[in-house]
Amino acid sequence: MKRKICVVVLNRANYGRIKSVLKAIKNHPQLELQLIVGASALLDRFGSVVDTIKKDGFEINETIYMIVEGENPTTMAKSTGLAILELSTIFSNLKPDIVITIADRFETMATAVAACYMNITIAHTQGGEVTGSIDECVRHAVTKLSHIHFPATKLAKERVIKMGEDPKKVFLTGCPSIDAIANIDLGMDDDFIKRNTKQGVGSEIDFRKPYFVVLQHPVTTEYGEGYKQVQETLSAIHELKLQTMWLWPNVDAGSDDISKCIRGFREVHHPDLIHFRKNFTVEDYAKLINNCACLIGNSSSGIREGSFLGVPVVNIGSRQKGRERGTNVADVWYNKDEIKNAILKQMKHGKYPKDTLYGDGHASEKIAEHLVKHKIEIQKKLFY
Amino acid sequence: MKRKICVVVLNRANYGRIKSVLKAIKNHPQLELQLIVGASALLDRFGSVVDTIKKDGFEINETIYMIVEGENPTTMAKSTGLAILELSTIFSNLKPDIVITIADRFETMATAVAACYMNITIAHTQGGEVTGSIDECVRHAVTKLSHIHFPATKLAKERVIKMGEDPKKVFLTGCPSIDAIANIDLGMDDDFIKRNTKQGVGSEIDFRKPYFVVLQHPVTTEYGEGYKQVQETLSAIHELKLQTMWLWPNVDAGSDDISKCIRGFREVHHPDLIHFRKNFTVEDYAKLINNCACLIGNSSSGIREGSFLGVPVVNIGSRQKGRERGTNVADVWYNKDEIKNAILKQMKHGKYPKDTLYGDGHASEKIAEHLVKHKIEIQKKLFY
Amino acid sequence: MKRKICVVVLNRANYGRIKSVLKAIKNHPQLELQLIVGASALLDRFGSVVDTIKKDGFEINETIYMIVEGENPTTMAKSTGLAILELSTIFSNLKPDIVITIADRFETMATAVAACYMNITIAHTQGGEVTGSIDECVRHAVTKLSHIHFPATKLAKERVIKMGEDPKKVFLTGCPSIDAIANIDLGMDDDFIKRNTKQGVGSEIDFRKPYFVVLQHPVTTEYGEGYKQVQETLSAIHELKLQTMWLWPNVDAGSDDISKCIRGFREVHHPDLIHFRKNFTVEDYAKLINNCACLIGNSSSGIREGSFLGVPVVNIGSRQKGRERGTNVADVWYNKDEIKNAILKQMKHGKYPKDTLYGDGHASEKIAEHLVKHKIEIQKKLFY
Amino acid sequence: MKRKICVVVLNRANYGRIKSVLKAIKNHPQLELQLIVGASALLDRFGSVVDTIKKDGFEINETIYMIVEGENPTTMAKSTGLAILELSTIFSNLKPDIVITIADRFETMATAVAACYMNITIAHTQGGEVTGSIDECVRHAVTKLSHIHFPATKLAKERVIKMGEDPKKVFLTGCPSIDAIANIDLGMDDDFIKRNTKQGVGSEIDFRKPYFVVLQHPVTTEYGEGYKQVQETLSAIHELKLQTMWLWPNVDAGSDDISKCIRGFREVHHPDLIHFRKNFTVEDYAKLINNCACLIGNSSSGIREGSFLGVPVVNIGSRQKGRERGTNVADVWYNKDEIKNAILKQMKHGKYPKDTLYGDGHASEKIAEHLVKHKIEIQKKLFY
């Protein structure tokens, strides 16, 4: 009998980070994929990732709405609670052998808590990394609830073991997000341009000319600061007068503040060079950043996929604090001038050499093998 | 302005482990106590701990029902989700500065998840201990979500630090449960007897003569085994023909199986020497075990309060596996004869000397001081 | 394409009232049955109706836990809320054309609210009847949310129309519960006796000799009175010294009080002639009451199935106040002597003639036909 | 002791319809006001009504987030379920004597279901009216759950009684929304202009010159049609080339479609004469429509407050179908030309005479008196 592997995809970042694993599971003769899609991955406001998933050929077992609106710390907690309520019903009906939970978000936590109380083995990707925001403590808590670990880097693996996990259950596989971009042509092409024209709002981007990409999420532990933080970035970009593809932030507490700031800026300054989008497909996002003059903001993609692709990145503020990074990343604080100067330096430098810090493109096949062979043991034990 | 300290008490064990801290907070001029009582602490089936709390003079800010009935792994997860939904509303209305969460239960997890996403500082007691059951991984996950740690033992403190917590935020205070029993007369007396006669079901206990106490909870990670496990204990006790005070198990997954086994046994064997009770006050429970011939089962109270009081304990199965223990504990497996023999040995041995492994009776005052002085910092960071 | 008919069965009474419809749908070439089982129908404490449903050969699409423990007015509301949360996810995944909701319970309300907001056509059975308890207002509110009505009696049909429903959507079908008992041999036989021996607790019943059946539920609008109410019944039965099959009450607010009273009575009086059971199959319950000397309590089965079978019934208190009844029912108040006298009179009278007030045994086939042919219109309109 | 009256305000329309009652309760010596604010009334996207409520001097007992994001039929059901979960905890802690629920929305339903199961007396305003959308059946279902009725019109009162409510508990008070506007100066003035300049997005309105007001909500029972429906209105307004104050729609299923259509229209047509706002205070909204050239859309305010103020209204589509209306309302279908023609006719006609169909401005004092004197009886009974 095939092992049933349940993957819970609850936002656009999740999907990019796990798509290659979904494929590997789907194609493996000894594994059966159970796919749950929910939360912001269902919402139009975040680009309806669910449609992309269907287009990519995956069959979805269940969809669940679970975001309590408000985008503040209270509703983040409530969404987590609601997700646990929903996921437990679904797990009890699907009866998976292993549940995969991704990285460090509230959806990740909900998945881990539900599966853990239900005596279902949990496999966790991206454990052992270090950052700022609420993600930092959630990531490590999820490690403590998980039974199998697929860290992306050597140092992350060491940290997972240091935290008391059994070394025999911690596997350095690299990050599956690299798989998705390692073996495809990431040059700018007409198809990309066709697909990505007349999407989003604001004036169109000419992808044949230099452009910036901006993606700045709220930092939940600095809730209330988002408005001011993103205003610095907006002003910097506006003054640099280069065409810019700006992605709306994720659903975390404080997202509303950032959106409000952007909308206000649009009303007042009519920034004709900035185009706003909700979402790209995984591959198009890779192309987008691979060909940009500079990626600005605080998305982990600058550090993770960015290092592999050698994208010049300006990373702003505390959200990625402590995360291992390649030479492609310049760190600055929430300050217009710092941001501007760093961008100018990065433009001057141009592309960086490829760095396999976060993986060499073979993570998903390794993960699938472990999912097949791993001996299931529910009772965890601090390993000291 | 006083610091608002919110304590969430969601079952009878929680209450015994935190009562002395509640008092210390209530009496501290710089602290304000916010008390939330819910879950099985509200249920008659578990002895309505809420009534005891009121009798003890504590004012309750909010009560919340949150147990989804079923007593299986699915409903344990659902109860956790529901608890997070409820607690987040309450926290957003009470606005505490610090939330205290206790030990390792699903209620503990819910409290930690809600507070953590709401950027509220979390203080955790009993971190760093090692056991079996789901409690093991929940306890360490809660450590990773918490900002201040009050471990009970030296080794527990070391483990919390090893897991990557900042040593400056880990305080060896001892367990507050010891405070509650360190300074009171625990001899058997007429008042105790009066208070505890005609409570529960089954024939009455003569507390002046030797008696056993039994408390055996389900082991969630061995869900489905509870019926057989407790039958061994029931048979052993029945054959030893000594009067016995048997406490009903807690609300964890599998509790139903244990209750069913007990009820079936009662219908068939009419065990005239066994009395069944739902709950004792904190102090009466201490007297009860302090004067018993042997405490049998898998409750941590045998190890924790038991070591301080020198109670002869027969600890059954995997639930307490790995927990530090004094010489008073004899470990056996789920096996009638093993259990019987161990009990007979413990009866022969009688009381053990006092052991302060889990504290010397001054935990709560130390905890209160830390709660006053601790510098609040929301952003956590893996400390390696 | 077949019409997808979703039936939500959430307790033992629901099941008896809809089983014949489940069969009719399952067997109809133009209908596809979607079956959801949850709430107390999953709980061992209420006899695990889910197992009976499986044994009866129905395939269950989803199971859901949704009872918030406490059995008080607050948890009854919470269970309703939780049920709506759960059912909406399930409906959105199953996409039924019509949802059937049964009678007047909080599960009924939850089903109706979820389906109604989701623009799913709702068919309601047992609308238009009049009773006491919370059921009274819930039943009529569900009528106002439903699109197709299958009342059981002529008067009920008239009331549904009076309340403003479109007469073309109100169909007098009789109650499906009568179908289940109309065409089977309901004489006492060895198989019944074999199946129903060594079930439940208390001394065995000799089904060849006269016996009582008691089923007394809480009256939610008289919450807090249940203990006293059932004590009168217990005393009456105890004094009559006839063997008695007593069924535990349902999950409504106040159920706990009744159970507590029964358990207390058992501990003190050791009523050797009373046997306690959680549940019977639909057919065995019909046999049980068909052959009893008297059915006592406040279950609607005395009035509904009882009138068809001619069972002598003593109906206690306000729960069935206003419900149409045959001559087989004697009404009394919560009073030991009134109860005793009424039972003695009913025993003297013996069986009553068959009365088809609640149906002639062909409800389910009529309902199935309407489900096939009914024109689906979501927008309701007060019909005056 | 004062009677505790709990009012649950969960969106901006609720607030305008109950504000005068809040005042009357607050000022009544025998009543104590308990105020709960939640759902979209907390959300910035809908104008943060909570801030207005605080500015108006009301003390809020509890706030609750309860909107599950998605704005589709599934999430509407889920929000209702979540609201019941939350409200039941709050009611159990606040212990009100009477709960007031307003009109016909999902929040209304949630309040009624929670209170009803908790044996709390429910007073309902705006029962007995007839409309389209899901509101139609929800309104009547809430009537069946409520104990006291405060209908706004004579016909509505008759309908409530026809549905089987006890005539002694149905009081024709008029609509409290009229109170709020009956006794204030509703002329355009500098203060209004000052307060309402530089709010919202799009070019500024000159309130001294003719302007339109548009407010078009989704029709939940026509889910999926909203985009096309509002496009007709947008085109009509765009072509009429008069400055327009456009309010964003409410949170009902389909709201997203409408917002998407509006945003798309803005991006393509840059409609310089249309200004977009989230919310007005109750009084400013009255001024806004009292001085407009025409009120267009499907808000009940055109019919209710509009008839009292004599505002020329063009009412589009099915949402208000069947609602009693004065001569000020011209009904049209979702069709650009119909809409344009009707607007032109209404502009030509100008203001209508005052009509007290929905009340004379004294509803709240009458309601407060009934709240004081009403005999509380929990058990309802169909009154035929």
Image (cartoon, coloured by chain):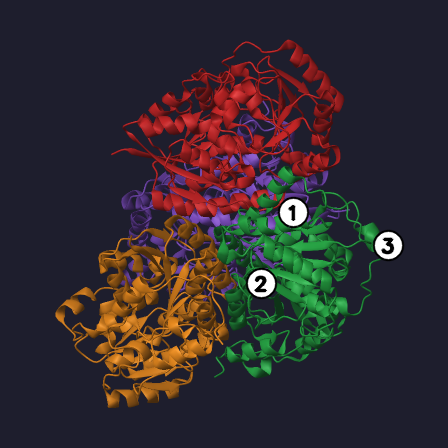
Chain colours: A red, B purple, C orange, D green
Q: Residues within 10 Å of mark 1 (few under 14, many from 20)?
A: some
**SS for dot 3:** helix
Q: Are marks 1 and 3 in contact (CB under 8 Å)?
A: no
**Which residue is most to the left?**
C190
At 20% across and 66% down in the image, what residue appears?
Answer: C197
Q: CA distance from mark 1 to mark 3?
A: 27 Å
Residue on which disc 1 sits: D45
**Left or right, B121 with reference to B208:** right
Q: Residues within 10 Å of mark 2 (few under 14, many from 20)?
A: some
Residue on which disc 3 sits: D190
Front residue of D129 and C58: D129
Vertical placement of D290 versus C358: above or below?
above
Which residue type carries mark 1?
Arg
Residue A240 in percent (x, y) is at: 72, 20
Nearer to us of marks 1 and 3 is 3
Residue D82 visible in the displayed image:
yes
Q: Earlier in the sequence, mark 2 or mark 1?
A: 1
Q: Residues within 10 Å of mark 3 (few under 14, many from 20)?
A: few
Which residue type carries mark 2?
Ser
- Chain of the residue on which disc 1 is drawn: D
- Chain of the residue on which disc 2 is drawn: D
Nearer to us of marks 2 and 1 is 1
Residue B311 visible in the displayed image:
no
Residue on which disc 2 sits: D92
**Quadrant of the image for the N terminus of chain D?**
bottom right
Q: Quadrant of residue B171?
A: top right
